[in-house]
Image (cartoon, rainbow, N blue to C red):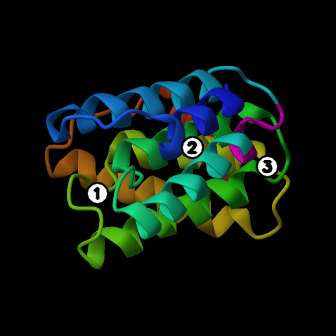
Amino acid sequence: AVKLAYLFMDSSRQPKVDPRQRDVQVSVLDDVVQMISVSRRKDAGEQAEQIIQSRQELHASIGKFAPSFHTYVLAIDAWATSGRKDAGMHAVRLLNEIERLHEGGVLEEGRPNMRVLSTVLIAVSKSSWIGRTNLVETLFQRILDLCKAGDRSAKVNTRLQTCALSYIM
């Protein structure tokens, strides 16, 4: 899938495309990242981030293929399902990157919602990251605050509460 994404992003191999089709190209790249994220492979997070990095480089050089909010969320999903002990650390780093880009006006289409924070919380709770207890508590509180504010992108279900409480207590 990663090779397919690189091949697809190589603009020297692509014919000139109507600018209105750019969204279709970006959608295909996001589909590749989604395939990686559901693969549950140990290297899924790394592969998703490689595509993000390539898209950032292409955007800097040719002004196309900038990673979207959705791409970052899919990369967080890839880390959360990878089963790696350092997945939580990588998911938090991507969450911080999303927030930094959003505050800087680079990522205008989204900000972390309950679904994103829940995925990061699950990744952190599965990791062997020292000091994660305070982070789990902070993430869970942010999720509850978003829920109170009307965010319905995810549910605060028993699984999520168990994940959080097992590390807070």
Instruction: Residue under label 3, please give it.
Output: 127
The location of residue 11, given as percent across then percent down, is 48, 45
* Quarter placement of the C terminus: bottom right
Q: Amino acid at mark 1?
A: Arg
Q: Nearer the viewer, mark 2 or mark 3?
A: 2
Earlier in the chain: of badge 3 and badge 1, it is 1
Q: Amino acid at mark 2?
A: Ala
Instruction: Residue under label 1, please give it.
Output: 111
Between residues 108 and 169, which one lies in front from this camera angle? 108
Q: CA distance from mark 2 to mark 1?
A: 15 Å
User: Does dot 3 land on a helix, a strand or a loop?
Assistant: loop
**Side of 61 where 162 appears, left or right:** right
Between residues 17 and 80, which one lies in front from this camera angle? 17
Earlier in the chain: of badge 2 and badge 3, it is 2
Whether residue 43 is in magenta: the answer is: yes
- Main secondary structure of the magenta stretch: helix
Image position of 81 with respect to 133: above or below: above
Residue at 81% x, 54% y is: 86
User: Does dot 2 land on a helix, a strand or a loop?
Assistant: helix
Earlier in the chain: of badge 2 and badge 1, it is 2
Instruction: Residue under label 2, please give it.
Output: 75
Stretch in magenta = 42-46
The quadrant in which residue 10 appears is: top right
Q: Amino acid at mark 3?
A: Ser
Q: CA distance from mark 2 to mark 3?
A: 16 Å
